Image (spheres, grey):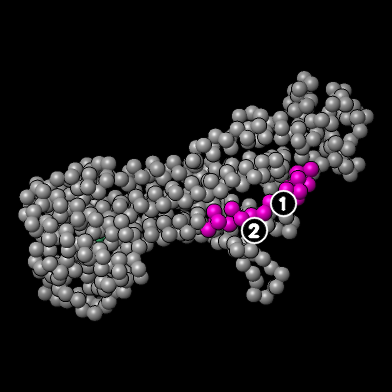
Amino acid sequence: MARKTKKKPSVAKKQASRKPWGGRFSEATNALVEDYTASIQYDWRLFPYDIAGSVAHAAMLGKTGIITQKESRRIIAGLKSILQEIADGKLEFSVELEDIHMNIESRLIRKIGPVGGKLHTARSRNDQVALDLRMYLRDEILDVLRLLRELQRTIIGLAEQNQDVVMPGYTHMQRAQPVLFGHHLLAYFEMFERDRERLKDCYRRVNIMPLGSGALAGTVLPIDRKMVANLLGFRGVSENSMDAVSDRDFAIEFVSACSQIMVHISRLAEELVLWSTAEFGFITITDAFTTGSSIMPQKKNPDVAELSRGKAGRVFGNLTALLVLMKGLPLSYNRDMQEDKEPVFDTADTVTQTLAVVTGMLSGITVHRDAMRHASEDGFITATDLADYLVRKGLPFRQAHEVVGRAVLRALALKCGLKDLSLGEYKKLSSLVRNDVYQSLSVAASVGRRTSHGGTAPANLKRRLAALKKYVK
Ligand code: ARG
């Protein structure tokens, strides 16, 4: 389905045709009200879904005999040519016609005559807009899923190329225990995998067909909702007409799942910013994904990472906007709900753009393995391993912790690392220490021994990488 137009369509302000709901009104709409109530400036983006939904609806009206097959065919042909007009940027939308639904319907009637007025039989804009938004979200969810997968593939590739690279793992932003860089990276694989699961779960609930709910109460006409659902690829039809036109929980779920994605992206971005500082020097981001300073000639800034961190705020704002929008609304449809579009569109646009650019940035980073190794050879980073050594010799962990704490204090006083303390020094702290203690103080041994399920050992990383590579194929 054509989801993009050749150019952004223009929206005219000139007095258009009579309102589709003009019958009951004796006064023209105030110009301020026209502007205030219109959504065509942004909801035009729903046009492919609006038209696909109308085509299915018209086919159903013909099949059930609510309109004739001939009328149905004329309506469908008209709708298809309007789809082309919009895609080619040839249809000028009008503010007087409020939204995408009335713009298309009005164009249809102008195009094929009064028979076009039969399209809206057994339908309301309330169930129509719910349908359009669900169809739009199905496509966006699939896009986000695909982009997340691309990012995961990039993460796997980077972890694989740097399988033997050791770095300090941090807690409280203090060096804690050595880990494999690949293990650190694969932590993000797991996060993005859960993000994909959330989206897939959300998709199931988005993929329910609301059309046929009418304005709120259903319809007296013998419609076939299952047929429309089948034509549009929905897995089922909504069970309650009032719920179907008045809840937007499916959109909130999407924005919530996207918010969680942005939390993960933002944390990754923050690490890339830190790692690319002179202070860390763990990575270099390639020129194509950085920007310069207008005053300081030497600067190369990680703006892409920073913006992806910053844009998380927009998405969280969108989530809040939608929650607050819905919380006070009595059943069923209320016009407030028109305000759902921009936060939803902005979320989808922000997340798809962000995932694409972050994936590009990550795939081009240079890893400075020596700097990472050097940082992980910090004198105390294997302190836990020393405690574990004493535990293996039979000391209760709490006592081992105490002994190692004193060893650290002693090393600090002597201005050296744990591996530089003499055996004599160690013996003074615990009679359990033997010459083999130095083996357990090496970074390689520390990492190599962490073979518990999910631990950082190279053997684990190798196995996990092999499994994941097969999984993402
Ligand atoms: N533009 C409206 C929206 O986005 C469509 C539904 C309008 N329905 C109505 N009864 N005014 O929510």
The type of residue carrying mark 2 is Ile
- Using the rendered view, name the quadrant where residue 458 is placed: top right
Query: In the picture shown, does residue 211 fall above or below 435?
Result: below
The N terminus lies in quadrant: bottom left
Q: Which residue appears at 35% of the width and 63% of the height?
A: 4
Query: In the picture shown, does residue 448 fall above or below 143?
Result: above
* Outermost right residue: 424
Q: Which mark is residue 341?
A: none
- Residue 120 is situated, as x and y percent measured from the top left of the image, at 14, 59
Task: Write down the region rendered in magenta.
Answer: 357-377
The type of residue carrying mark 1 is His
- Using the rendered view, name the quadrant where residue 17 is placed: bottom left
Does residue 206 appear in this view?
yes
Query: In the picture shown, does residue 421 fall above or below 51?
Result: above
According to the picture, the residue beneath numbered tag 1 turns out to be 368
According to the picture, the residue beneath numbered tag 2 turns out to be 285
Q: Which residue appears at 64% of the width and 54% of the height?
A: 365
Count of all numbered marks drawn on residues in the image: 2
Residue 359: say if magenta: yes
SS of the residue at dot 2? Answer: loop
SS of the residue at dot 1? Answer: loop
